[in-house]
């Protein structure tokens, strides 16, 4: 493979994106646990949900004005790029991909979209005891609020599946492809090939 570009280390993920990621993981886990197993009062669930909302708003803006690897235009690719990537994905060697790879990008978008839907439906919901009322519940009809509440319950399971898949894929990269993706999300540096 002498014609392949050399592998080199670059500063890939900026500090704000890394901070965003680990805070998101913390607050999504907290909101999920508080929603399912927390006290009857949903005060803390709401606060964790608002923290997730704030983080998502940041990520949306950062996807347009952040450094190149953080931009949606940098990692969102068409079906052909996804197909090409998938064909080589099971090789037992690191991808050295300079950012989210075309398939991983789909999972990033799926997680972000599921989280946006989760916080929006949460804000339109009210709890069984009608004490904890989402801030948007008063602005929608009661049938919309009920539908939002149904979705919110389903969405929490969807998020669990997406996050489990996310972690399984990262373990697959670590042990099958011998590529550490977690380190770069902690310190920012990654070995990449090409650009
Ligand atoms: C509730 C838990 C989690 C959520 C919601 C979550 C969500 C995300 C999102 C949205 C991204 C894309 C980052 C961006 O560009 O905005 C991402 C990337 C990443 N996450 Fe997580 N994550 C979670 C837990 C974890 C855990 C536990 C690990 C460590 C095992 C992890 C490791 C990573 C890594 C390594 C990347 C970068 C992947 C790449 O190189 O393309 N995440 N995660
Ligand atoms: C990532 C963010 C969030 C996650 C993972 C999440 C998860 C959950 C879960 C698992 C439940 C219990 C569902 C059930 O079994 O009935 C729940 C209930 C609820 N959540 Fe969230 N939630 C999030 C954000 C929010 C936000 C931002 C709000 C509003 C500010 C909110 C408002 C509510 C309300 C009012 C309920 C009670 C609904 C009921 O009693 O069925 N959630 N949430």
Image: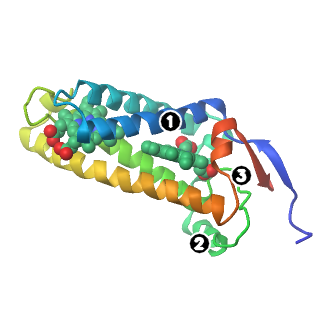
Quadrant location, the N terminus: bottom right
Mark 2–mark 1 Cα distance, whole angstroms, equals 27 Å
Closer to the camera in the image, 177 or 57: 177
Instruction: Give the Cα separation between the discs numbered 3 and 2.
Output: 18 Å
Residue 14 position by quadrant:
top right
Residue 163 relative to residue 171: left or right: left
Nearest to N terminus: mark 3 or mark 1: 1
In the displayed structure, does residue 159 sit left or right of residue 143? right
Residue at 39%, 39% in the rendered image: 29
Circles 3 and 2, Cβ within 8 Å, touching? The answer is no
- Residue 122 in view in this figure: no
Label 3 beta carbon within 8 A of ligand 1: no
User: Could you tell me residue 159's position as x and y percent?
Assistant: 36, 50
What kind of element bears circle 1?
helix
Q: Which residue is mark 1?
A: 59
Mark 1 near ligand 1 (CB under 8 Å)? yes
Mark 3 element type: loop
Residue at the image point whose x is 47% and y is 51% from the top: 109
Q: Residue at x 36, y 35 (%)?
A: 30
Q: Position of residue 184 (x, y in %)?
A: 68, 43
Question: Which comes sooner in the sequence, label 2 or label 1?
Answer: 1
Nearer the observer, 8 or 142:
8
In the image, taking residue 47 as reference, residue 94 lies left or right, namely right
**In-front residue for pair 23/71:** 23
Residue pointed to by mark 3: 98
Q: CA distance from mark 3 to mark 1?
A: 19 Å
Mark 2 sits on what residue?
A: 83
Say if disc 2 is inside 8 Å of ligand 1: no
């Amino acid at each position: 493979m002498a014609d392949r570009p050399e592998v080199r280390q670059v500063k890939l993920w900026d500090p704000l994106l890394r901070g965003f990621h680990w805070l998101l993981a913390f607050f999504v886990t907290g909101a999920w646990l508080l929603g399912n197993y927390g006290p009857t009062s949903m005060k803390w669930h709401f606060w964790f949900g608002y923290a997730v909302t704030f983080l998502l708003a940041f990520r949306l803006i950062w996807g347009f004005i952040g450094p190149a690897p953080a931009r949606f235009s940098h990692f969102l690719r068409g079906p052909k790029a996804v197909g090409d990537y998938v064909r080589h994905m099971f090789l037992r060697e690191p991808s050295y991909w300079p950012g989210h790879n075309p398939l991983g990008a789909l999972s990033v978008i799926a997680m972000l979209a599921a989280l946006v839907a989760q916080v929006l439906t949460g804000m339109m919901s009210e709890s069984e005891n009608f004490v904890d009322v989402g801030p948007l519940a008063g602005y929608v009809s009661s049938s919309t609020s009920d539908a939002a509440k149904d979705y919110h319950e389903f969405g929490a399971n969807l998020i669990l599946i997406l996050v489990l898949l996310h972690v399984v894929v990262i373990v697959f990269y670590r042990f099958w492809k011998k590529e550490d993706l977690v380190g770069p999300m902690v310190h920012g540096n990654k070995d990449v090939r090409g650009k």
